[in-house]
């Protein structure tokens, strides 16, 4: 209802005018006198109902428009995540306005209070969860409700609820300020389960929001050492999670019947900061009311997904014809690109390459065989001897191209594991120039009593010669 305009009823699909007569000041005052008191957030309600009335004011503070939202309690809205709510872990609900976050909070409070017999306290800032008036709506069950006089005092009421009323669960709607985020962390650290909503559609929105990022652990900039940056294959300055998240579980309410669940917010935030797609569950409800759960697998890291394992020279990489596939005498495929018997140039290049890496006799056998079955490369198919010899060798590469080193290991099928931890390494493989220049590397190897194997150049030929030794 807007002053001087026709009253309008808006539905999800369309809007209809309720009258052809414009709204007058007398009609607005008539409606205002029959609703509750308007608080600091310009919201009021009707006692014993879930209806919400919001006011639009002019510069002098007079009400010139009303937005009346019809509210009703809907049961069964949390069937998709009831198993998560019953784990006593804190749950954060995210989603755009109108997707049903407040209705889900109301139902969660009732289930925890009535079905699980927990002491539940609702922090009701604008009386949206339990309705207007001193007596809360029956939709919250046995849960208790604490009203907030002014929205800016919500964080104080949150702390007061923990200190005075011994709750096991606290339900909060619309965490939107830094003080409220800090109060939520304080509550979680005291062992109280939190169920709340926050502004934002996805966890990425919270990560980028400096005010609410503390809900997911907070973000800080970290400067890495040269060695650590090389090990991670990243820049020296990276973003990392600062602390454990306030909420262990996050639910992205994309649609009313389509939710994305992050079972571990800490793992999700770490994956997003590293540029990976996190592992999450997708829960949907069909027409019959049954819940379907599917899992989105994490994506391959960008640096790994963009490369191909092709241990032969680039000239062979261009040959995409059917025919012979290079494999070792044990059935191991050495190249992913088929090579035709008719292409003599390509065959000669492959032969010269194999001669230099595996020996003349072995390369002849490889090029003559055409019907060998592939087996796993690396140490997966390797069997150690009776005394333990031949067990996987853990190598810590320092300044070595992982791409080319993995190609060599795949080609030669050696029982070698590349490790990122020096303490678990059996040997260090480094360039000769790096060993001479970096005293820290020599000191690190001496302290841990790990031998250093040096190679002259970071090439496939030198890596293959070193691995064969």
Image: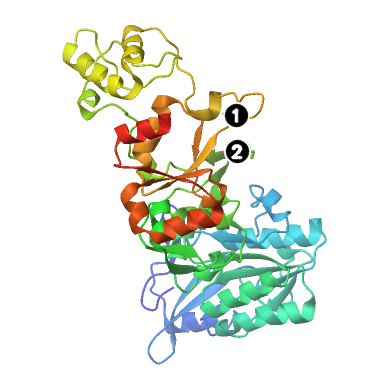
Residue at x-position 34% and y-position 16%: 326
Label placed on residue 73: none
Q: Residue furthest left?
A: 345
Task: Write the residue at 49% across / 34% down.
Answer: 416
Q: How is the image coloured?
A: rainbow
Compared with residue 330, is residue 212 higher up or lower down, i.e. above or below? below
- Whether residue 30 sits left or right of residue 10 in the image: it is right
Q: Observer-nearest residue: 34 or 243?
A: 243
Dot 2 alpha-carbon crowd within 10 angstroms: few under 14, some 14 to 19, many 20 or more: few
Q: Earlier in the sequence, mark 2 or mark 1?
A: 2
Q: Which is in the foreground here, disc 2 or disc 1?
A: 1
Rendered image: mark on residue 292? 2
Quarter occupied by the C terminus: top left
On residue 389, the disc is 1
Q: Residues within 10 Å of mark 1 (few under 14, many from 20)?
A: few
Whether residue 22 sits left or right of residue 241 in the image: it is left
């Amino acid at each position: 209802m807007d002053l001087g305009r026709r009253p309008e009823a808006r539905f999800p699909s369309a809007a209809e005018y309720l009258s052809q007569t414009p709204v007058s000041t007398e009609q607005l005052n008539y409606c205002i006198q029959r609703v509750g008191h308007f608080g600091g957030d310009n919201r009021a309600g009707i006692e014993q109902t879930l209806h919400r009335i919001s006011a639009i004011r002019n510069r002098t503070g007079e009400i010139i428009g009303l937005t009346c939202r019809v509210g009703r309690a809907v049961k069964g809205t949390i069937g998709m995540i009831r198993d998560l709510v019953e784990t006593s872990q804190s749950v954060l609900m995210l989603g755009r306005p109108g997707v049903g976050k407040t209705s889900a909070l109301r139902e969660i409070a009732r289930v925890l209070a009535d079905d699980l017999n927990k002491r539940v306290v609702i922090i009701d800032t604008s009386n949206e969860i339990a309705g207007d008036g001193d007596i809360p709506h029956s939709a919250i069950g046995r849960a208790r409700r604490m009203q907030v006089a002014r929205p800016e005092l919500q964080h104080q009421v949150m702390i007061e609820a923990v200190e005075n009323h011994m709750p096991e669960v606290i339900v909060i709607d619309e965490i939107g300020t830094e003080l409220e985020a800090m109060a939520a962390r304080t509550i979680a650290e005291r062992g109280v389960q939190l169920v709340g909503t926050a502004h934002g559609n996805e966890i990425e929105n919270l990560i980028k929001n400096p005010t609410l990022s503390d809900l997911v652990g907070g973000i800080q900039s970290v400067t890495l050492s040269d060695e650590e940056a090389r090990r991670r294959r990243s820049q020296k300055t990276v973003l990392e999670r600062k602390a454990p998240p306030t909420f262990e579980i996050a639910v992205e309410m994309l649609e009313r019947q389509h939710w994305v669940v992050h079972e571990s917010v800490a793992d999700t935030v770490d994956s997003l900061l590293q540029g990976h797609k996190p592992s999450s569950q997708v829960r949907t409800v069909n027409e019959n009311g049954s819940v379907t759960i599917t899992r989105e697998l994490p994506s391959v890291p960008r640096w790994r997904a963009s490369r191909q394992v092709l241990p032969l020279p680039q000239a062979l990489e261009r040959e995409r014809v059917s025919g012979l596939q290079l494999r070792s005498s044990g059935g191991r495929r050495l190249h992913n690109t088929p090579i035709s018997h008719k292409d003599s140039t390509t065959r000669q290049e492959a032969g010269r390459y194999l001669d230099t890496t595996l020996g003349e006799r072995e390369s002849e056998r490889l090029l003559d065989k055409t019907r060998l079955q592939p087996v796993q490369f690396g140490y997966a198919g390797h069997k150690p001897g009776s005394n333990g010899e031949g067990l996987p060798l853990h190598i810590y590469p320092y300044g070595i191209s992982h791409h080319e080193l993995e190609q060599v290991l795949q080609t030669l099928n050696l029982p070698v594991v590349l490790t990122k931890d020096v303490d678990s390494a059996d040997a260090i493989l480094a360039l000769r120039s790096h060993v001479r220049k970096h005293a820290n590397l020599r000191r690190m190897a001496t302290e841990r009593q790990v031998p250093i194997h040096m190679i002259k150049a970071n090439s496939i030929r030198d890596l293959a010669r070193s691995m064969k030794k």
